[in-house]
Amino acid sequence: MDETIKKSVAASVGAVITSLVVTPLEVVKTRMQVQVPNVVHASLAVQKCPYYNFSNGLTDTMLRKETLLTRCKCSAQQICSPPKPDSTLFTMARIARLEGPLALYAGLPPTLLTAIPATAVYFTSYEMLLKKFKGAFPEHNHGVLAMAAGGLARGAAASIFSPFELIRVQMQAVANAHPFATYVRKAWQGGPRQLFAGLGATLARDIPFSAFYWYGIETSKEYFSERLPIADPQRRRVYVAFISGVLAGVLATVGTHPFDVVKTRSQLVVYSKDMAPAPSFIRLLGQVWEAEGARGMTAGLIPRLVKVAPACAIMISSYEAIKLSFNVD
């Protein structure tokens, strides 16, 4: 079997394992991020107010179809939503109690559909680019070369698989999600603008995340490979990958979380024929800050951190372990 194919298989298996473990935390993170300010203004003069009832298993919230940052220009009537959930565990328990345990795996089919090919493309592209960069710039710091390779590889993978990421987020954000085919049909009917909704925010988050993540991976590997007291080199390689994944993932997450919030909001826009286009990434970032401040920018940070630490550790260590079983460096 070709070495590139072996690496692709290793990345794909790691993606499946990681998705099964962390999908419940991703569902909780998404639910927390789409909570909106408690007061929504509507018009008494408008008979058909452009809102829909967003029931996400935690609250029933009136949302404007244009954007999840619901702020009507009219102010005659107020519709108040129930209080927000106050913790990650509370959110997870309530989803399981009201919707059933399987609701914590909402969006798993598109997650797997995206994760398997996207991770294969991402990891193999990263290793190919890093190898080329090391050959072209042998005197440069390997961590810096890893940043460049990681950012480029992630940007390419995110662009290719953006429509599937959009569908996954939409399925995870609502209670009792429609069948997967319904979201595919809706996204396709919306055209390229809706298929790639949130791509700018995705790239703004994923490229720097990947750059700092791979910098952390490579530098941590160099550090712990020399210091971890494990005699067996193969076991040491897997343990080093696990520790490096945790540290690199957490650091990258904290730095890029505001972009993750905006990405999630931009992908949950609901269009209607009489509505204006979705706001741009910069405008949406400003709206989140103006409406919710630092609290909005950090919404879902704890569950994302809890998700990222095991996800990065499981993914990179699984990848390294499977490569070892294939006798691939």
Image (spheres, helix red, strand yellow):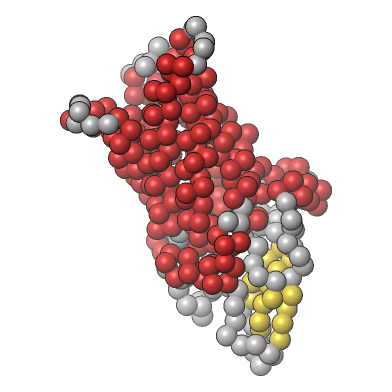
> Percent from the top left, x then y, of residue 236?
49, 14
The residue positioned 50% from the left and 31% from the top of the image is 245
- Whether 320 is drawn above or below 192: the answer is above
Report the front residue among 247 and 82. Answer: 247
> Percent from the top left, x then y, of residue 313?
54, 30
The residue positioned 43% from the left and 64% from the top of the image is 281
- Whether 85 is drawn above or below 240: the answer is below
Is residue 19 at least partly visible in the picture? no
Q: Quadrant of residue 295?
A: bottom right
Q: Quadrant of residue 59?
A: bottom right
The residue positioned 65% from the left and 87% from the top of the image is 75
Does residue 16 appear to the left or right of 175 in the view shown?
A: left
Does residue 180 appear to the left or right of 122 in the view shown?
A: right
> Percent from the top left, x then y, of residue 260?
51, 53
Report the front residue among 57 and 236. Answer: 236
Q: Quadrant of the N terminus?
A: top left
Q: Residue furthest right?
A: 97
Report the front residue among 186 and 88. Answer: 88
Q: Residue furthest front?
A: 227
Does residue 257 appear to the left or right of 78 in the view shown?
A: left
Q: Quadrant of the C terminus?
A: top left
Is residue 175 at least partly visible in the picture? yes
> Percent from the top left, x then y, of residue 69?
57, 70
Q: Residue furthest top?
A: 231
The residue positioned 51% from the left and 52% from the top of the image is 257
